[in-house]
Structure formats: C-alpha cells, structure tokens
Image (cartoon, rainbow, N blue to C red):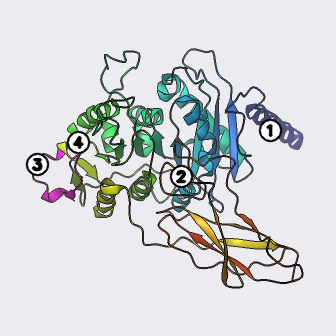
Amino acid sequence: MRSSTSFYLALVVLCSLAFIVDSSAQESPYDVFPEAEPPYYSVRYEASKEPGQLTYPVRYTIWIPNGVATLRGIVVHQHGCGEGSCSSGLTGAYDLHCQALAKKHDCALLSPAYEQPQKADCQMWCDPRNGSAAAFDRSLVDLGKMSGHPELASVPLALWGHSGGGHWCGGMVMTQPERIAAAWLRSGVPLLEVNPDRPAIKPHALPEAALSVPMMCNPGTKEGVTVKDGRFANVWPANLAFFNNVRGRGGLLGVAIDPLTAHECGNSRYLAIPWLDKCLSLRLSLESGQALQKISLEGAWLAEPTGATAIPANRFEGDPVNAGWLPDETIAKAWMQFRKDTNVVDTTPPPAPAKVQRDGNRLDWIAEADVESGLQKFIILRDGEFRAEVGGRGKNRFGRPLFQNLQYSDTPVQPLAKMEFVDRTAEPGVDHDYSVVAVNTMGLESKPSPAAPEVGGN
C-alpha cells in the first residue's frame, strides 16, 4: 500500500511540473530558448489575474554545478525592461563566466525571463512587491524539486541586475535584506523617495538590515554623469539620490561609473564578477543553512562617487558617508582600473579544456571560464601546431570579444556557441593528434588539453 501511495504522489509531482513548464502559450520573442537538460532546469508560469500576483508570464532557468551535494547560495542574473532585455534572460543561466563565479562558491546560477510586452508597464515585474518576488520564491521550490536541491528555497542570493533589473535587485534588498548576500545594480536603482516625474512608482523604505548588504551602483557615464541629455539622462540623478540615502546612513554602497558607456553593460562584468566573488567570500557561511556573515569595515577603501582614485578608509580625510565603499585593496585596485578605461587587469590563465574527443575529423570538448576574465576563444592544435581558432560569432559591440558573445542585458546570444570544430583539411586515412587551448578575454592562454582520443577507439 505504501509503495503504491509513493508512486501515486511521485506521479502527481511529475505531472504538476510538466504543466508548469508547458510553453504552448508563449509568443515571440519568448518562444525561442535553449533546451534545459540537467544540469539545467526550467519552470514557466502563466500570468495571473489575481490581485498582487505577477501579471506577466515568466520562465526561470537555473544551472546547478556538478558535484555539489548542498548548495550555499544562488547567483541571480536579472535582465532589464522591454522585449529585447526580457528575452535576453532566456540565456542568462548558460553564461559560462557567471557559472564560473557560481561554481567557485557552490552556488547555482539562475536567470528569470519576464515575458513583458514591449510597451507594457515594467513596474509590474521590476518592483518585487507586484508579484515577481512571490513568483521567484515559487520557482525556487519547484526548481528544488526538479533538481534534487530543496535548499534552493532558503539559501542566500547574490543579485546582479540591469536597468529594471537593478530596480528589482535593489527592491529585494529593501524588502528581504536578510537573504541578500550582495547586489550589483547596473543602470538602475529602486526609489527611496517619491519621484514627482514618475508618481506611479511606489518608493521603498530603507530598513536598517539593508545597510549591511554590500551594493554597487554601476551607471554609464553617458547616463547623466558627463552626458546630461538623452533617453537615460535621469539614471545618474536617481543613482546619486539612492547613494546619498544609503551611504548617509552608513550603508555598504559603492559607485562604479562606467567611463565608456550609456545604458549598455559594456565591460562591467570584469568588475562586477570579482566584486561579487569578494562579497560572497565575505558573506557566505561555510555550511549551508547558516545566516549571512556581517562584513567587517576593517580594511575597507573609500572613493568619491565621480572620482577615479580610491584610498584606505583609515586615510580618508573627508566625511566617509560622502564616499563610496569598497571592501578591500584588491577590489579598490580593480575599481580604479575600471574607472580609467574598464580594462581590469587579470594575470591568471584560464583552465585547460577537458573531455576533448574526436570522431573522425570532428572535435568537441567542454571548458570552464576564467572567473576573472571569461572565455574569448579556443585554439585548435593539430600535431602540436596551430590549426584554427574557434571564437564567438562576430565582434561584441558591448565590450571585449567573448566566445558566447553578449546581448544588451549581458547574456549569451542565441543560438548558444558550441565547443566543436571540424577539420576539413584532414586527409582521409591520416591520423593526427588534436588538442585544444582556451584563451581568456585578456589574451592569456591555458595549457593545451590532453590529446583527443578517437570516439570508440582504444
């Protein structure tokens, strides 16, 4: 009797999850997305007509690093407003660079994709109080069941958000600060006071607990800093008001103005990922399920919001609440490089590709990104000599060339780049040794992989 009951319950769960991921009602551009096979999992919910619930459909996709028995947290990549940005969320969990950050800390990588129509109200999802926080929490329970990681529902969150996604991430800090390890706010912040120009946006209260959450405002210089007009000219005034409120009460908030961009994300990931890496190291407990750790102010650095020089906090001569907070010297140096030209230096080569295999003249492999610099391309060696390069499709107009390239909200383009190569110059019957070298975005090369064995060979 017990076994029959267990089977029935399992069948109910599977049927329920199958209903959740049904995509029959999806419309362009949200109907094209990568397949989610383990270690990827995906759930989708239809829009709700209930008061306080999410008014748009949404898909959540998560990546779980192999070999992690119990996850310690989730890195959340949150897109911005409009169809282009929203649809870019469909590939966020497939970002190799963000996966490297998540794996380093035994975290999952999750990316929502809110199916907002182009001219619809973005506030209906980017304010977490309008149903998106509840849908997000629901997804963690369902994804936990699918992946065998029920702890997803309760682990801390490290948030990265662009534009409306910055509003959402900052709103999560204001409403649920105890579960947020850190938040990077690219070109978008929540309002803490009523804006007469946008009265429909409800401001947030700033709770005491939010002051302990490390945050970074990351606007582009052409969003009101050095370019005072145009579509995004109000981004900097909003960031400055947010900064004055949070830092005025001693909050752990910095400002990293991108010196090259407007609203596009540019090269901001090369500071955002090291910053999140540092914050996760300082905030996550060694064991899953424990409270977040409070960051010590000892060793902090400070920098003027529009300046380009950071100095140790104990040597800062002005009022510290007027300066942005940086956690330590390493991040301060990276911040200064970013403020100069976004060219954050990295001296570490990427990991060598693994599981390289050959089937005739076709090679495929897997590779992990360099945490600091990501992946730019691969070099194919034949008999120890250069044979070809395998890189992204075209130039990345938003920043450094990347193997996966980037969309506007800093996620990989579709279809996803594949790690494969066909040697069309190989002569039939001639046996060659092939190996693969990974190259990061600083041009540093990994060691060559072991020679590729023939599939089915000895």
Residue interval drawn in magenta: 304-321
- Disc 1 crowd rating (10 Å Cα; few below 14, some 14-19, many 20+) is some
Residue 372 location (% of width, % of height): 46, 63
Count neighbours of disc 3 (C-alpha within 10 A) and say few if under 14, some if 14 to 19, many if 20 or more.
few
Label 1 amino acid? Answer: Leu
Q: Which residue is mark 2?
A: 396
Residue 318 is tagged as 3
Dot 4 and dot 2 residues touching (CB under 8 Å)? no
Q: Nearer the viewer, mark 4 or mark 2?
A: 2
Q: Give the residue number, with chain letter if any, for mark 4.
A: 250
Q: Is residue 194 left or right of residue 60?
A: left
Disc 4 and disc 3: Cα gap in Å? 14 Å
The Cα–Cα distance between marks 1 and 3, rounded to whole angstroms, is 60 Å
* SS for dot 3: loop
User: How far apart are labels 2 and 3 at the CA level?
Assistant: 41 Å
Residue 267 against residue 6 in the figure, above or below? below
Tell me which label, 1 or 2, sits earlier in the chain.
1
Q: Are marks 4 and 3 in contact (CB under 8 Å)?
A: no
Residue 331 in the image: state x and y as whole percent: 33, 59
Instruction: Give the residue drawn at x 23%, y 35%.
Output: 244
Q: Residues within 10 Å of mark 4 (few under 14, many from 20)?
A: some
Q: CA distance from mark 4 to mark 2?
A: 38 Å
Q: Amino acid at mark 4?
A: Gly
Q: Secondary structure at mark 4?
A: loop
Relative height, residue 226 to residue 285 (above, below): above
- First in sequence: mark 4 vs mark 2: 4
Q: Dot 1 corresponds to which residue?
A: 14
Tell me the quarter of the image containing the C terminus.
Answer: bottom right
Residue positioned 23% across, 45% down in the render = 306
Q: How far across and down, in percent of the image, does residue 269 sit?
A: 45, 52
Check disc 2: other Cα within 10 Å, few if <14, some if 14-19, many if 20+: some
Q: At label 2, which amino acid type do we have?
A: Asn
